[in-house]
Image: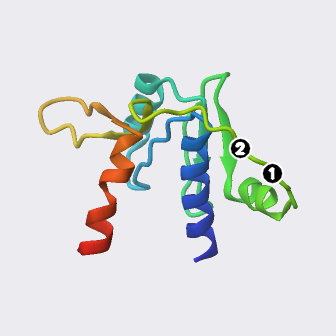
Amino acid sequence: SEAGLQFVVLYFSAMAIGFVPIASLALLTWQEVNYIIEDAGIALIYQSDLTELNIDLPDDCLLLSETDLKHVFEQEVVIGSIEYTTHQEDPAFITYTSGSSGRAKGVVHAHRVILGREPIRTQW
């Protein structure tokens, strides 16, 4: 779907400019979402129109809706050469564990992990 493709572009674009995205499930409870926001020090949240966050965001946290993202993609932006400032050992994204042995823990994955996934994508 177009919204799904836009999310993927947003996710990888965020990593390219040095943000560290955390993908999460829409089925998380508000307590779990609040925990991740506090634990990770979230600065920006993207919320699909299919989900509704009933949480109090920290004052320094921005909320980007699906409508906001559509407006970004509607803009005609010409980007010259981009200077990437990330390196292979820099944090790329965080996944949170299921919390089977207590509270969920954020696991940081470096940019090099993305290249390591290529054989999985092409051979599975």
x then y, percent, for residue 99? 20, 37
Amino acid bearing label 2: Ile
Q: Which residue is mark 1?
A: 79
Point 54% across, 57% down: residue:
51
On residue 119, the disc is: none
| Vertical order, 42 against 111 (above or below) | above
Q: Quick one: which residue is furthest to the bottom in this view?
A: 1
Name the secondary structure under disc 1.
loop
71 sits left or right of 62 in the view: right
Q: Quick one: which residue is furthest to the left in this view?
A: 101
Q: Residues within 10 Å of mark 1 (few under 14, many from 20)?
A: few
Q: Quadrant of residue 35?
A: top left
Point 44% across, 26% down: residue:
40
101 sits left or right of 121 in the view: left
Q: Residues within 10 Å of mark 2 (few under 14, many from 20)?
A: few
Q: 36 or 1, which is in the foreground?
A: 1
48 sits left or right of 93 in the view: right
Q: Which residue is mark 2?
A: 82
